Image: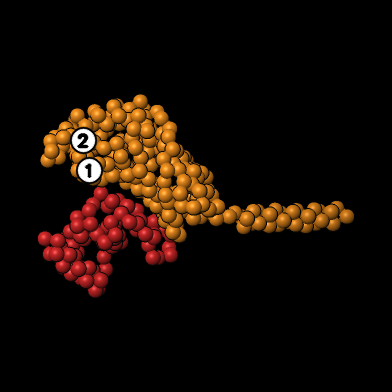
Chain colours: A orange, B red
Amino acid sequence: MKRIFTISLMIFAVITLNSCKKAKKEEVKTTTKGYTIDAKTTSINWIAYKTTNKVPVKGKFTEITLNQEKSATPIDALNSVKFSIPVASIFTKDTIRDAKLKKFFFGKMVTTDNITGSFALKNDNTGSLMLTMNGITKELPVIYVIKDQLVTIDGTLNLDNWQAQAALKALDIACKDLHSGKDGISKTWSEVKIEAATYLKVE
Amino acid sequence: MGKELDKSFDEAYSIACNTNKKLPPDIMLHLYAYYKQATKGNNYEQPSGDVQLRNAFKLNAWFQLSHLTENEAKQEYINLVNKYLK
């Protein structure tokens, strides 16, 4: 009798363990694919302008920190992200210019370390970027294109909206000769074009 | 100067396309990125392959050249072909 009871107990234990295994397997199966943004495959380029002839100066930020959740669609992935760009990662192929931008432009701002932001994209390839710079958060209209996993986002910001006039003036004075054209007038434009691209990760 | 550069670039591209030499993956990636920057600039497009990790590497390499003009990228591509395939 005792033996029968022990065998029954063992069978019960095996059945219970098997059903636990099945439950775990089913749990894995229900994990859905989702989109995330990968900092390593994200590019943030910008074009600023100097002289009265509006000569373009191209540059980029080489680092970005992302705080995000895995999302069901590319738009949801972009709208869920909060990003932070260290201004020290600015790169223009000219180390002297990079140092001037850090010292005279970003260095004159209220918050001198990071540019932060988040997206509010709509389904019609337009939307906005809530950008925080110089302690001010403002909306920047953007247009975007999603093709498979590649997303490109473009926008043009006016630095005056972030009250960066003093920083821009400081940069203009520091770069007076370089920002003067044939007319001898030094000008640093408050307009900056932003071009971002990212290859979304699907997993 | 522009026409000479274009001619040299086309020749370099032809050499790279027809070579039987096996190049290390990092050099192949550089060739891909310089070619894309030379012909498309910063107008990015999804790589044609369907392997996500490979596409990510390709785009990462291309993104890193955004500071180069198309002519600068052409010259770098030519330099790379001359160094490894000539």
- Residue A54 is tagged as 1
Task: Give how far across and how far down residue A36 sits, in percent.
Answer: 48, 50
Please state which of residues A8 and A38 is positioned toward the viewer in this rendering.
A38
- Residue A87 is tagged as none
Vertical position of residue A193 compared to residue A148: above or below = above
Secondary structure state at the residue bearing disc 1:
loop
Residue A20 visible (yes or no)? yes
Residue A91 visible (yes or no)? no
On the rendered image, what quadrant is the N terminus of chain A found in? bottom right
* Image point (20%, 40%), residue name: A52
Task: Give how far across and how far down residue A172 sits, in percent.
Answer: 21, 32
Chain letter, disc 2 residue: A
Task: Give how far across and how far down residue A144 sits, in percent.
Answer: 42, 51
* Image point (22%, 53%), residue name: B69
Asked if marks 1 and 2 fall on the same chain, the answer is: yes
Please state which of residues B58 and A103 is positioned toward the viewer in this rendering.
A103
* Image point (43%, 54%), residue name: A145
* Image point (33%, 35%), residue name: A159
Categorize mark 1 by other alpha carbons within 10 Å: few (<14), some (14-19), many (20+). Answer: some
Secondary structure state at the residue bearing disc 2:
loop
Name the residue tied to disc 2.
Answer: A187
Vertical position of residue A81 compared to residue B60: above or below = above
Instruction: Locate residue A62 relative to residue A29 in the image: left or right.
Output: left
Chain letter, disc 1 residue: A
The disc, 1 or 2, on the residue closer to the chain's N-terminal end is 1
Task: Give how far across and how far down residue A34 sits, in percent.
Answer: 53, 53
Q: Which residue type carries mark 1?
A: Lys
